[in-house]
Amino acid sequence: MFCMKCGAPLSDSAYCPACGCDVSVQKQAIVLSGLYYNQGLEKAQIRDLSGAIDQLRRSLKFNKLNIEARNLLGLVYFETGEVVAALSEWVISKNFQPEENLASYYISNLQKDASRLEVINRTIKKFNIALKNCREGHEDVAKIQLQKLLGENPKLIKGYHLLALLYLREEEYERARKLLLRALRIDRTNTTTLRYIREVDEMTHKTTSLDQHRDLIPLPGRERKGEVQLLPISDEGTVELPPYRETPVSATVLSAIAGLLLGAALVALLVLPAATSAKVREFNKEKLALTQEIAALTEQAAELQGEIDGQKNTVDTAEEKISEANGRADSYVQLASAAVAYGDEEYNLAAARLIEIDPEILNEEARAVYDEMAAELEEEMYAALVDTGVTAFDAAEYERAVHYLEKAKEVEEEDYVVLNHLAHSYRYLGDANRADENFRKIIETWPDSEWAAAASQYLGTTQAQEGTIPSENLVTVPAEGSV
């Protein structure tokens, strides 16, 4: 433990041996942080994930440098399907302790598995789209999307809650009950799950038994789809099996003979005469069920087509929200990569990652990490912006070039390379006003120079073109001292 004022190692005394600062409150806070961490760990081990999140957040309030608590909080978030929140905690943890930190292992594993990241991004998009459809009244479409989402990410508790609400709205209480029990297996004390279960119980006048899902364990080798065979646990923690009783041979033989006679009698008296009529009834029943199913599917298809037609005007908004969610996830991944590169003293690589981040969409803690690294790597980030913009320009990617060069111009307004490439990018994008604005800036900043003379030739000549800019159309940078 170190002094919060001077950083010197502390002793058993209530005062710092180096600066004399009273550190009794600091020590008490660190002890409380460790206590809440232990309680959070205990709750996580029994899958009380909501309780674990609450305790771990309290632990970090008392000591934000509690790396174990922060890493565990990330794991609990990941277990509940909140991948972005988990990644944020690990990035902050890595920033506080770059060396010998399990957060580095978690982040690298997540980045290595590209398919897993793709599934995570896809489930986030589907949940956002399903939520939007619910708000707009397209509940059937939302149900289909949520069912597919939970098939890809069965740990997303928010998905269970939203789908259960849709079933409750349609009074399909048993289906809602099954979904909520599945969510309860992930997080046993989630207050939202328990509240929804209570509402289902009130609607059905049946009490959902929660004890069997908490105190029973599955019997190995006996699982069936949609059903788990369970055995009770004794007070000593062992599985209680029913006692074995040996059946006499004579009783077994007599039971077999009685079963054969009874079966023959049933076949003779009941089964054979009714076989034909039973098949006819079964056929008619299946035919009626198929007819009803076809009618329901036809009606559903008509409703879906109507919903699709009604959503054409909101496609742009949906795509914008999807793009925003993708950008937020990409920003956190880039921030994690930048933090790792910064810790490894690969500053150019860290700067290249930071210029791809939109800091406005980061949360408070992640924004603090971004601002700290950006302040340290200001020169490297500027060089990365210029290099990336010029490279995009050379590849005739003018919109991308404008994106990076405008950022560079915000840092340094009088860089000829930036102004020159920016003016020509706008010229070939057909934006005459902005192109001429940058050409005039060159003329005003370096009058009576070759740069100004070359720039003046392009004023008022802007037109949208395709393809690569010919070399003779680009204002070249004269050799040093020629201006």
Image (spheres, helix red, strand yellow):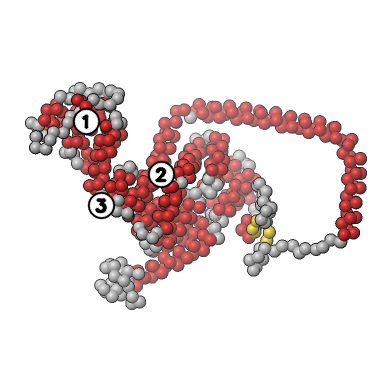
Amino acid type, mark 1: Ala
Q: Which residue is mark 1?
A: 423
Please tell me how crowded label 1 is: few (under 14), some (14-19), or many (20+) other residues with Cα within 10 Å: many
Image mark for residue 329? 2
Q: CA distance from mark 2 to mark 1?
A: 32 Å
Mark 3 vs mark 1, CA separation in Å: 30 Å
> In which quadrant of the rendered view does residue 398 lie?
top left
Q: Secondary structure at mark 1?
A: helix
Q: Do the CB atoms of the residues marked 3 and 1 lie less than 8 Å apart? A: no
Determine which quarter of the picture holds residue 71.
bottom left
What amino acid is labelled 2 in the image?
Answer: Ala
Residue for badge 3? 376
Would residue 311 be seen by someone viewing this image from the given angle?
Answer: yes
Against 239, residue 124 (above or below) is above
Q: Quadrant of the C terminus?
A: top left
Q: Position of residue 111 (x, y in %)?
A: 42, 47
Q: Is 83 left or right of 337, judged from the image as shown? A: right
**In percent of the image, x 50 and y 26: which residue is there?**
309
In the depicted view, which residue is nearer to us: 98 or 125?
98
Q: Residue at x 35, y 52 (%)?
A: 340
Q: CA distance from mark 2 to mark 3?
A: 24 Å
Q: Earlier in the sequence, mark 2 or mark 3?
A: 2
Circle 3: residue type: Glu
